[in-house]
Amino acid sequence: MSKGTLIIGGSQAGLQVAVSLRQLGDTSPITLVGEEEHPPYQRPPLSKEFLAGEEELDSLAFRTPGFYADSGIDLVCGERVCEVSLSPSGPPGPGVAITTSGRELPFDRLALTVGAGARRLPVPGADLGGICYLREYNDAADLRTRLATATNVVVVGGGFIGLEVASAARALGRSVTVVEAAERLMARSVGPVISEFYRRAHLRHGIDVRLSSVVSGFQGERDRVTSVKLSDGTHLPADLVLIGVGVLPRTELPEQLGLVCDQGIVVDAHARTSDPSIVAAGDCTVRPHPITGEGRVRIESVQNAVAQAHVAAATLLGRLDSVISVPWFWSYQGDLKLQIAGLTTGYDSQVVRGDPDDGQFSVLYYRDDRLLAIDAVNRPADYMAVRKALSQGATVAPDRAGDPAIPLKSLINASGSSSGTVNGIGEPLSAGSHLWT
């Protein structure tokens, strides 16, 4: 009898691999094992709607409890896989995974969707009570409880997660300070114009933003944090600290299997690891650029998890389709909705469309006059037009893109079409996307 597919990691990517296998006609057994005790759920709302009390765990679940049994998916929650053994006969061969409780999970095919964990801040006092991270539901539930009684909140890290939490805390009337080591906010994700706009916007909302500031330690009383110490000697009062300084892909299992890892599990365009019988998808992977196929990038987003997981499922079934997948992300900070399509890596020019002072504008990024990406603030039509253009291998002429009176969709020029097929397969498990920094 076939032992079927084992998917390690109860993440968005893990569930999408299972769903896509069924969509593609696979009838063999599927086991999805996750370390958390909760069935797979949406993570992006944890730093926004959930903290605001607008969502609960039940509403975040991707599927109803009966879906898994109805689909022939054996969902195993609350079990961490600590060891994986492959058959010595060589790939593609059966293997077995062992959990920390001693449970054995045999398989014929293996998918790794192990995700990433929050990067820890190794400074004195980092283990004091009141210092939080946000990656999983239990983290968010703890943070929401603490926010209810907090007075002074310090957010370490000016990325999407940090700024979303800062906005939520400020909306609750808390005193909020954001400490960012880089020279600008969200530097890894957006261009300087967007960074400066958000800095000013958060200042207007009463959030203190400290750039080029490094945390050197935490101080406390009775094992509770009371202040954050900066490298310049400044002490910031704090009874609640959220640390959002990025993530580290979980590579323990792939390294145990001898797979090539370099800041993540290295995979090709078909989601194959260095052992082509094993696939991987989601935040744990480093992959070729999804549009150009060049180099290696790690993309932390819902969109990437869904698209890459569908490709991984097809690969497990022996279907090696070439696809182009346009990365897209979003971040809602208060009333500011930032939507991103494409990757700005390597841009040499930009066009600002609209007036940032109006709170509705876009920035288009180019290399050699070729459209690479867009950051759109409260301009969803601009975002959708660029996303469409990139999916078609098209561009938007930079000399006209700056005129906000001209709809961007009317400027799409498909003369420079790219090769490959745009990835439109596989239904996403939730609306929108998010970059977890």
Image (tube, rainbow, N blue to C red):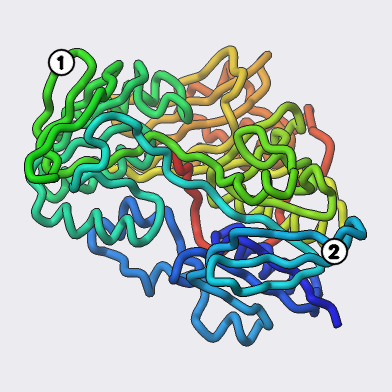
Question: Residue 350 or 61: which is nearer the viewer?
Answer: 61
Regarding mark 1 in the picture, which secondary structure is present there?
A: loop
Using a 10 Å C-alpha cutoff, classify the residue at mark 2 as few (fewer than 14 neighbours), some (14 to 19) or many (20 or more): some
Using a 10 Å C-alpha cutoff, classify the residue at mark 1 as few (fewer than 14 neighbours), some (14 to 19) or many (20 or more): few
**For residue 262, side relative to residue 90 (left or right):** left
Ranked by sequence position, the earlier of labels 2 and 1 is 1
- Vertically, is 292 above or below 270? above
**Rounded to the nearest whole Å, what is the CA distance between mark 2 and mark 1?**
58 Å
Image marks 2 and 1: residues in contact by CB distance under 8 Å? no
Residue at left offset 60%, top offset 41% = 327
Q: Position of residue 197 (x, y in %)?
A: 31, 25
Per the image, the residue denoted by label 1 is: 233
**For residue 308, side relative to residue 89 (left or right):** left
**For residue 435, side relative to residue 70 (left or right):** left
Residue at left offset 50%, top offset 19% = 351
**Residue type at tag 2:** Leu
Residue at left offset 57%, top offset 82% = 67
Query: Where is residue 354, by image quadrant?
Result: top left
Per the image, the residue denoted by label 2 is: 317
Question: Residue 164 or 35: which is nearer the viewer?
Answer: 35
Q: Position of residue 132 (x, y in %)?
A: 27, 46
**For residue 130, side relative to residue 132 (left or right):** left
Q: Report if residue 410 is visible in the image.
A: no
Q: Report if residue 338 is visible in the image.
A: yes
- Vertically, is 68 above or below 375? below
Residue at left offset 60%, top offset 47% = 252
Query: Where is residue 87, by image quadrant?
Result: bottom right
**Residue type at tag 1:** Gly
Regarding mark 2 in the picture, which secondary structure is present there?
A: loop
